[in-house]
Image (cartoon, rainbow, N blue to C red):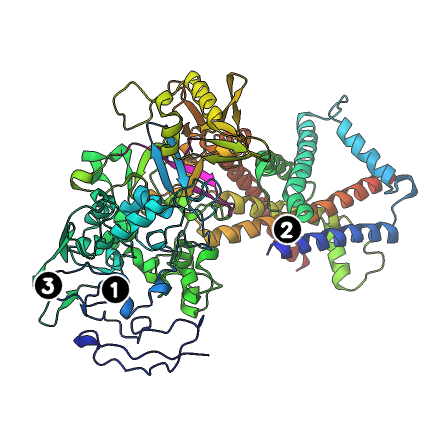
Amino acid sequence: MTLRPVPILFIGLALTAWPVLALAAETVAEAPAVEKLGDGNDGNRSTPVHVIELLDEKGDAIKVDETRMNPVSLKQTCGKCHTYETIAGGWHFHAGSGKIPSGRIGEPWVLADSETRTQIPISDRRWAGTYSPGELGISAWQFLQYFGSHYPGGAYGEAEASADDPVAGLRGGISGKFEINCLACHNADSNQNPSDAALQAARQNYRWIATVSSGLGLVKGTASELDDLYDPWTESKIKCLYDKGRFNSEDKVAFNIVRQPPANRCYFCHSTQDMETAGDKEWTRDQDVHLAAGLTCADCHRNSANHMISRGDQSKSNAGIGSISTLSCRGCHLGDETADAQATRKAGRLGAPRPLHAGIPTVHFNKLACTACHSGPMPAESTTLARTARIHKLGLHGKHAVNMKLPHVQWPVFVRGADGLIAPNKLMWPTFWGTSKEGKITPMTPKAVKEAIGALIKSEQPRVNDWIPLSTETIATALTALSAQIEEPKEGAKPEVVYVAGGKVYQLSGEQVIETEDPAAGPYSWPIAHDVRPAAQSLGRDGNCRDCHSTTSPFFFGTVTVDSPVKPDEVQLRKQVSFQTISPMFAKAFAFSFVFRPYMKITVILCCAVVGAVVLAFVLKALGWFSHTAAEEE
Amino acid sequence: MDTLFRNAAVVGFIVVFGAIVLHSLLFPSARQCTLSVRAILRKFVFLLTLVLLEQKLGPIGRLKKLAFLVAGACFLVLFMTGFGPRILLGVPLSGWALMIHATFAPVFAVCLAFLAASWAWQCCFSGTDWNWVVRFFTFKWKGILADCDLGWKLTFWAMIILFLPVCLSIVSSMFPIFGTHGQEVLFQIHRFSALVLSLVALANIYLVLRARCKAEQG
């Protein structure tokens, strides 16, 4: 049965003219969610003013004259007009919620620890090379502790603790749910402070995150320091101190809500730092050419109420929603003949200039992603290290700021992707202790490793925020000890203990450690989309083939470090071409052929000149003959 | 366009080979010099061994012979690498085949330029050819296809003229002059003109061999 929209509260003066919708007469289990006031769009492009009543997680209004003011719950407050469940299905929020789309391969969460020499790519999107939190035995509660600083809320943040995890049950009751923090993106107020959100996440003050980070108030107290039996509804060891000046006489608060999140909001979780220009050189870096031209992230990365933001991918993940399919490099700059709307079939969307690509043979467009020539740092003789906001927890200020060296992420590495196109990637080498059974390697978390063999692999050095060298002798000792701790299963063979690093699997053979190559130990890489460089700085500009086709070009022959804590003095390097499924010999020979390319052009042009001259000479001769014959006939 | 090219190539080769077979059947050359498989092979062996045997030709003649043989070998390589992947495998020219193609192309160009310059005089049209044209346009067609020198001369000049778009289209695409659309057009010009050049070259070889038979008979 189809349900009609529900009558809704008026939200601020600007919304008073909105139509009052009919109340649904009945509800049906499993029926589609009832459309709320904020789910649709009446076509008015102005942003509705949000002067709204704040609700706590029980749905009660927060009044300024109350002695105890609870933290705001955005699930309740925003959910009054926007269907929270619909939003929760978006890319940012649905991780860990069971059946989720994989989408194009992307940046994972990375569990890194220098003491155990670990860096594990984690994702529950089933991307090849990543491990799901479940595989590692990481509960939702633990996931938030590892990655809460840049977590947008929802899914793991709202998961119910399992019965066999009493700690998560007890602590979750104190900390509350880590709801989707709508304001993290949509609050354009300059007081919106994601670093404060990260601080509250570190303190396990999950239910207070939105209140503090939006600048509505302060929170005194740390949930992680409270005892397990603390009752947040009756006790007052955590106090929420609102900025009461923000409440009007009707206990409503004005928010500077925008439909399109400003780039600054996106940057908090989606920044990349090039370690070559880190620190006091950071100001020398240019931003993405699109931002410099006045666009913002959300101009291309759009979404409807379901928050399935278009990822700029010209393949599957954009398809299906009419003009959205053109919100990719090719779509805007070249048009998309398969798009629904006539206008978007043509190039030039959002004012995108149509590229000339003068002198670039069209075969390149079948073999390379647009980003190969246009995005990321210019390829150099060797890759450099990069840090990303989510992996390295960038953007945290104050005493909870960190300066993570691990994991080592390299860029740009030119890798052939699943779509068959070569694109610049960020790349890391998974490094971890784990078990191998029937060919499947399962990592162990740093916590589990420390408990099992922490003493054996502990370094004498003071705490190091980077790789601590690991000798093969130590690996042998640790693997032996680890193996001894694994119980024989009732059925099947006992799993073999392994250490994975630098693309190799180290395992015991008797008392010796042997190292083998294994695809499971291979690098994990994900495509770089931004920063896009100006056209003038793209590879091959002005027909300069030698940007890539020379025997020393970084695109093919630049080096990528095989990063490993094992034997760090014997650094192994791999050529870029080895990630492109191209024969290195062919790449070299092809590049070498470009040495002769100018001579070939000259030779062929000279030959054409000779042939042209011959043709011209005999055409003139023929004309002469014709003239002579015509004269004789007369 | 790829399908069109593939179909055009297949049809073109069938038509040209068919026309050659039909022509040789309808207008067989003299008994002593039939265009049997054995005779054609004998001709090729003769041509190939010319570079190894003592030559009675002068320096330019030897160069012509050498250029002809090298051009023939290059043509074979370019033909196979250029048409093979698309027609036989349905894939674009790339990888090692592309490199081989690009390596032999300038050699072929040099040889053809030399042959153009050195053979042009021989292939110059004469009064006899003019008479043939007059016969053709006055509908005096009896025996017109049996004995004619115009065919190999025409195909020679067609080859020489087609050489220009084949070469210039691909060389100009290597300069930063033409954009994506231009590149695509140049590429299509290259491969379609190369297809026509190949068909004309096959016809030329047949007609030259016929003419040689006729000359030997005479």
Which amino acid, by three-letter code, is at mark 1?
Lys
The first of marks 1 and 2 along the sequence is 1
The image's mark for residue A406 is: none
Q: Is residue A378 above or below residue A350?
A: above
- Counting residues from the start of the chain, the first of labels 2 and 3 encountered is 3
Residue position marked by numbered label 3 in the rendering: A246
**Horizontal and vertical percent position of residue B203:** 74, 47
Badge count: 3
In the picture of the structure, the residue carrying the numbered disc 1 is A58
Specify few, some or many for label 1: CA neighbours under 10 Å numbering under 14, 14-19, or 20 or more.
Answer: few
* Mark 2 crowdedness (10 Å alpha carbons): few <14, some 14-19, many ≥20: some
Q: What amino acid does circle 2 point to?
A: Trp
Residue A625: numbered disc = 2
Residue A323 at what x, y percent from top left?
Answer: 41, 65
Give the image quarter of residue A492: top right
State the CA–CA distance, disc 2 to disc 3. 100 Å
Query: Which sits earlier in the primary sequence, circle 1 or circle 3?
Result: 1
Q: Is residue A11 left or right of residue B10?
A: left
- Of circles 2 and 3, the one toward us is 3
Most distant residue in the front direction: A229
